Image (tube, rainbow, N blue to C red):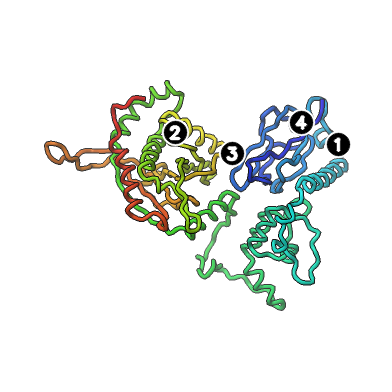
Amino acid sequence: MGQVELIMPKMGESIIEATIIKWHKSVGDTIEVDETVLEIATDKVDSEIPSPVAGTLVKVFFKEDDVVPVGTAIAMIATEGQVADSPMTGSSQEDTTVQSQDAEEASIKIAESFLEPLPAQAVAVEMIAPNAGEKKSDKFYSPLVRNIAKEEGLSLSELDKLDGSGLGGRVTKTDILSYLKDRGSVQNASTNPIATPTTVSQKPTLGNYSMPSGEFEIIEMDRMRKMIAEHMVTSKSVSPHVTSFVEADVTNIVAWREKMKDGYAKQYNEKLTFTPLFIEAVVKALKDFPKVNCSVQGDRIHIYKNFNIGMATALPSGNLIVPVIKKAELLNLAGLTQQVNDLANRARNNKLKPEDIKDGTFTVTNVGTFGNVMGTPIINQPQAAILALGAIRKKPAVLETEYGDVIAIRQMMFMSLSYDHRIIDGFLGGSFLKRIADYLENFDPNRGI
């Protein structure tokens, strides 16, 4: 009996806008309560937005790839008896065009009215200050775009020249980052106004490196892959990486899990995997070596009291995300198992929230999932270390017994620890890694659930 606005939700304290990446519903479609209407993306996480009511989607104010401030109406849903004209209900093409234009104009007004001007001290003149003789711009720039411009030293005149891909030609984060990526070549071209077009070589170059010739397919990175690439490059440039390795005998853990997994599922209604068992050992080792649970800020080391363990999770898209188990030191095995399963399931189903992937202090990644025996992981900044778990394999191993050394078939696993050599030296990193192995090898096979 009415119309309900679908609002861009606030996805975290630091999130002021989100990008619409996919509409699951079109104008005229029927929507059930809690049914997904669209997918959005922030700098931290992707999320699906459900409908708060049952009805029909009658208006869409923004299109895919638009950047929308939180709190802004992004669509209109009509409840029973309030379906508006649409191509599916017999409206003319002319009416549809007018409605589309009206919606676009309305969306621009909504977006502009929602963003309040920043305080005077926040919008410093040097942020996008005009050069001498330049006039003040009358273009609208979001706080995020202004901050990027300030950090990268873009002048107001340079920013005004950008062609925005957002609604009403607004410059988005993607626009300014793309411009900055090619800024050097753009500036070089601008210094040679009489340059003539040149023929593109059949063998393109990447920096100073010559790329292979021949046929190839070009695949654009998706938004998440771009973020991962930037994060990895930054980590390698910030932290001098050192990697230590150890091999652990996990026969007792493998046998215990095999014996207990069915009873565990009945008692806790949770699937018992190896991950919570390994994280349990990591937490114990962090208690013994708390200086590993740290980050570096300038010339100061921050040692964290809580052990917030990130678990790298592969997504169906092939990308990677790292949800975080907060205060893992307070959880028993049942609590760790519940957290591991919940975060992994929500990650794979695109249900994580921004707070689920923030504040990690140490990360664990399982390269054994892909059949790899070991790996050299890249540190998840601003953390100082990351543990990689290799595949568990049956191998002959030498055992020391009271009757002498014997060779037996054991379940063996390599582990590798990459750490920031600015603040963690070989003694600390190696001792911490060996302690994890000790806890795994000394696992009590008679332990209850």
Disc 2 to disc 3, how far (Cα)? 22 Å
Cβ–Cβ below 8 Å for labels 4 and 1? no
Q: Which residue does the numbered mark 3 point to in the structure image? A: 353
> Which dot, 2 or 3, sits closer to the camera?
2
Kindly identify which residue carries mark 1. 91
Mark 2 and mark 1 residues within 8 Å of each other at the beta carbon: no
Q: Do the residues labelled 2 and 3 touch (CB within 8 Å)?
A: no
Q: Which of marks 1 and 3 is nearer the N terminus?
A: 1
Q: Would residue 390 appear left or right of 23 to someone viewing this image? A: left
Between label 4 and label 2, give the one nearer the viewer.
Answer: 2
- The alpha-carbon separation of the residues under discs 3 and 4 comes to 27 Å
Q: Which of marks 3 and 4 is nearer the N terminus?
A: 4
Q: What element carries label 2?
A: helix
Question: Which residue type does callout 1 highlight?
Answer: Ser
Q: Can residue 371 be seen in this view?
A: no
Q: Which mark is residue 56?
A: 4
Dot 2 or dot 1, earlier in sequence: 1
Q: What residue type is labelled 2?
A: Leu
Q: Which of marks 4 and 2 is nearer the N terminus?
A: 4
Above or below residue 416? Residue 203 is below
Query: Mark number for residue 26?
Result: none
Crowding near pointer 4: few (<14 within 10 Å), some, many (20+)? many
Mark 2 crowdedness (10 Å alpha carbons): few <14, some 14-19, many ≥20: few
Where does the N terminus fall, quadrant-wise? Answer: top right
Residue 439 in percent (x, y) is at: 31, 38
First-in-chain label (4 vs 1): 4
Seen at 38% across and 56% down, the residue is 242
Q: Decide: is 392 above or below 218.
A: above
- Numbered circle sitting on residue 330: 2
